[in-house]
Image (cartoon, coloured by chain):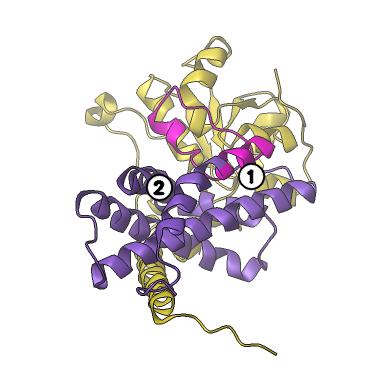
Amino acid sequence: MSAVCRLILASIYMLAAAGGLEHPRTFMRSVGDYHLLPQGLVPLAAATLPGVEALAAFILLLAVFRAPRGPGRWNLAVEGSELIATGLLVVYTLGIASALLRGFQMDCGCFDFLGEHLPFFKPTNATWWTVVRDLVMLIPASILVRRQRWLGEDGR
Amino acid sequence: MRSIKLSPVVEARIWAAIIVGGAGAAAGEIYNALTPRGVFSPVVVVASGRGVSADAGTPAAKPRQKPTASAKAVPAKPRVIELAEAQSLADKHAARFVDARSALRFAAGHIPGAVSIPSTDFDAAFARLKARLPANAATVVYCEAADCDESDIVLDQLVKRGYTKLMHFKAGMQAWEDRGLPQEQGAGR
């Protein structure tokens, strides 16, 4: 079950990161459209997010084939990546919902670039359906985080 | 006030997330600093007063050369035009304008008479508009601003489809808007 959830999250984040890395400036404009960050921080966020997504996705993908067995650095790296994947999804979902509630119309900036490579893929604007989609994506993320031993090795 | 005491395992996990996130962030920053189209790449100023991404391969960065006989076999490289020429072409209806931005940005405001062919939905949009875009007609492609790359993608596709009179209005919609030129709104026809 963990492997399937990790594979789903890794796929989502690899595609998301690829868009931000392929079109950094378009991605930066999308980040700015959410009106969540001061203008000065938008380029920094646009440069940072795809890197974080790509590394977390890479670790999650490796963990599909080499699951962590017991405590250790690899286990921590995988659990840290699971936390990042979940945290980013929560931030993105809240960000889209917040922008929609404030009346902004914007491109999602999520997987739009796929349309350049896959003719059947239709780019979409950010809507409440995007929020629902992100909530669905949160299901595998929350399964992984729930499976982490939050009470410690001795169960306390 | 009660302080929250995290178990060592949870603390270690949070630190792991911070370290992985920090490494990814650093990688993203370095990538953007090194890639020509990155968010930190320097911008050079061209005659129009608008910035152009310092991409060594852009037509604006190179001096124009007279076409030679041997160059005939190579598809013509789109000519970069500036705001004054774009405005003149639009006023005289002397060229067709293609907006390469997303449908949403197009609907919010575009050059009058332009058609929407988003780079992310090229095939479907082109199939719909092909009849209105003859390959031998003067065609101007633009996107948001000098640093966007949607127009490059659409131009590449049009070159592949045999379009010969392509122009690249690189300063884009931002320059048009800054000059206070008229815009059309809506999804277009």
Q: Give the residue displayed 36% in from the left and 75% down from the top.
A: A154
Residues in magenta, as a range: A109-135
Q: Which residue lies most toward the top here?
A: B131
State the residue in front, B178 or A79.
A79
Judging by the rendered image, the residue that carries numbered circle 2 is A9
| Vertical relation: B116 (above or below) B49 | above
**At 45% from the left edge and 68% from the top edge, which residue is drawn?**
A150
| Letter of the chain in purple | A
Q: How many marks?
A: 2
**Chain B colour?**
yellow
- Element type where label 1 sits in the image: helix
In screen coordinates, is B56 left or right of A85? left
Asked if residue B45 shows in the view, the reply is: no
Residue situated in front as seen by the camera: B94 or B24: B24
Point out residue A92 in the picture as x, y percentages from the top left corner. Answer: 58, 53
Element carrying mark 2: helix
Q: Residue at x 67, y 43 (%)?
A: A106
Which quadrant would the C terminus of chain B be assigned to in this image? Answer: top right
Looking at the rendered structure, the kind of residue marked 1 is Leu
x, y percentage for residue A18?
38, 48
* Residue A39 highlighted magenta (yes or no): no
Marks 1, 2: nearer the viewer: 2
